Amino acid sequence: MSHSPSIVHRQKKREQERLEPGTVLSWTTLSHPPARFGHRPRTIALIELESGAKVLAPLIATHPHIGQKVHPRMRLSHITEETLRVYEVAYEALVEVSVPVLDFPGYILALTGPSGVGKTTVSKLLTQMFGHVTVNVPILTTRAAKQGDDGEYVYTTPEEFERLKRAGSIVAATVIPSSSEDRQYGYRGADIEAIWKEGKLPVVITEMHLLSGLAEHYSRRSILSFGLLPPGKSKRAKLSQLLHRLRTRGRETEEHIKDRLKNAERDLDFFTQRSDLFDHIMVNEDLPSVIAAMKEKVPGLSKA
Amino acid sequence: MERDIFLVGSGLTPFGEHWNKSLKDLMDDAIEAALKNSGLNALDIDFVIVANMLAEVTNDQAHLGSIASSLLPHHPPALRIESACGSGALALHTACAFLESKRAETVLVIGAEKMTDASVDTVSQALMGAADSELDTPSGLTFPGIFGLIANRYMHEFGLTREQLSIVSAVHHRNGKENPFAQFRQEISPETVSKSALVADPLRLLDCSPISDGAAACILSTLHRSAFRLAASQVKSDSVSIAERPTITSFSASRDAMAAALREAELERSDISALETHDCFSIAAVINMEDLGFANQGEGIRIYEDLYAGDTPLFVNMSGGLKACGHPVAATGIKQIIDLSKFLKKAKAAHGLAHNFGGACASCGIHILENLDA
């Protein structure tokens, strides 16, 4: 009963809150864990997260000890009789050896998808899990800051934006029309190059025009491009999924949501028209599998 | 207590593996023994309370109040109490409430559990019902695991060693040797405990109370009198998940229930000479001594070192405790009161205390029994 679909569903909702580093308060190794976890001994820890919350979760450590610093890691726990794949958050002890230098020789990780598909959530998870190797490229925008923005934007005036664009400092730019104003968005080449210099991987959470702009500027081959689509068989089903998500996240007014949905419709067509711009298309049905797929497909991340 | 409540009779089945008896058979045996011991007639019972935790899972049986009632000729009204391993104490507490409110004058309280009908994995998972099913269970924890976490933390905070901890089970087994109702009646050395199989690091097999079958019944009355009067009945609670507590090396429900029980009985801690505590795991026994106020925090093991050396006036778990007697979950709380009455009678001692808890002490019941003949 402990893995019925509804229980797994609630478990999944909690998982995200648990994706924080923490400290081991205590640990134990069960010689014979419950049968569904297999027959290998299982180490479980009581962990105090950075937020102060405490969780009980599996611990991955060769030498567990109290006071150990641990990081969250999503992994497949087991597959139920109903073939439901149950993921769990395990905590991994930071390996106390010199960190191998990862090299990301001049490529960009791009994540493209319509509004509401879950790009921000995926990117937050990426930062939490691989923050030591990935850096989000800030988006330069002329729109005003608003509640719900989470440090992903650098704000500027339309004049300054124009100036930078003409000077060639902006490597990809787009205008997103809305019923109230036209907003400019773009990436600065300097931001991306600085990340490369640090030996890290620039990540862009982006949309179609910016993606094709980057592909033109840096060449298509330097972008490892992931498309993220909402679940649903038809375009209408996909759009209704998006509408639902936009409404439930409650960041925008109904008017803005309508704008976004209009743009999303165009975005969805773009996935078929410009399939050449994508290396992998993923359906955001559940977060853990999206992350797992990205980790597997990005060279460097699988080692990180 | 609002009224004088007397323990007028009690009965036990031996604890252990009863392959040829059902849950109902065990209840029947305990009821018969209790009635015989009390000298009362079955018709004197006007209410029945059954303590049980697992029957739905281990015996495919719910509706235990009526099952117990059907064992009496006049089918008195009955109900069932569940509070995990603390079900027994909670049932006694409920009986007191009925007696104090004059809803009943003579109440039969039965604790019964038949665990060996199910596989160890099933029982182990069912026992996890005493933890938080959404915060604790998904990690793969079992109860030995929860107490393994507690033990590890306790050792970290207070420097308790593995060798010291092994004394606890050695003391309980030595006490249980003389108890004809105990599941294990052989002595074990601390070294044997330290060498037994690892169950949930640092806890080993002989740190853990076993899976057992058994039933215990006692008859409490405001109408009939005996030498044993209940001086206090207190119940306290705590967060079920250990992840929601400020500390895991002390149980606030035990501390709170103890303070309330002493107040109710108008006694000092030093008036209590005999204790039956809830030693589901050896580490719990150590923490209990501290929470009940008989040792400072971090020094509970000293009482056990003294007990092992025979160097203390305090009598702790003279029955053998949960470790040697066995732990048929809900029967334990009732059994403790019965064992306490036997000990007080034999030792001519005045006050004894039974401490019974559920889960990792998310519910705790404390009863103080007074021997009027002492």
Image (cartoon, rainbow, N blue to C red):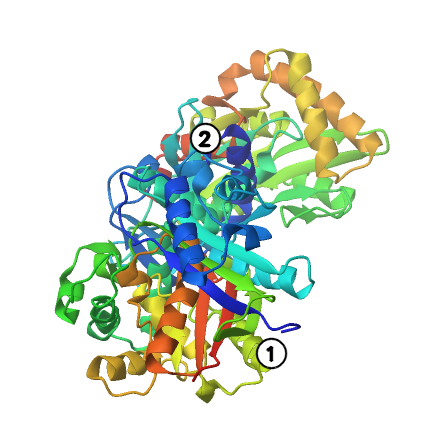
Check disc 1 and give the amino acid type. Answer: Glu
Q: Residue at x 32, y 40 (%)?
A: B21
Q: Nearer the viewer, residue A34 or B111?
A: B111
Q: Secondary structure at mark 1?
A: helix
Q: Work out which quarter of the rendered image holds the C terminus of chain B and state it.
A: bottom left
Q: Mark 2 — residue?
A: A289
Can residue B197 be seen in the rendering of this structure? yes
Q: Position of residue B365 (x, y in %)?
A: 51, 65
Question: In which chain is the residue bearing label 1?
Answer: B
Q: Residue at x 75, y 39 (%)?
A: A250
Answer with the quarter of the image where residue A39 lies: top left
Check disc 2 and give the amino acid type. Answer: Ser
The CA span between labels 1 and 2 is 58 Å
Q: Please indicate whether residue B141 sits to the left or right of residue A116 in the image.
A: left
Q: Nearer the viewer, residue A104 or B202?
A: B202
Q: Few, some or many C-alpha atoms within 10 Å of disc 2 (few <14, some 14-19, many ≥20)?
A: some
Asked if residue B306 is positioned above or below residue B50 in the image, the reply reads below
Answer with the quarter of the image where residue B18 lies: top left
Question: In which chain is the residue bearing label 2?
Answer: A
Asked if residue B135 is positioned above or below residue B21 in the image, the reply reads below
Q: Nearer the viewer, residue B140 or B264?
A: B264
Asked if residue A222 is positioned above or below residue B248 in the image, the reply reads above
Q: Work out which quarter of the rendered image holds the N terminus of chain B and state it.
A: bottom right
Q: Position of residue A178 (x, y in %)?
A: 80, 29
Q: Secondary structure at mark 2?
A: helix
Q: Residue at x 29, y 77 (%)?
A: B159
Q: Which mark is residue B256?
A: none
Can residue A22 be seen in the rendering of this structure? no
Q: Mark 1 — residue?
A: B264
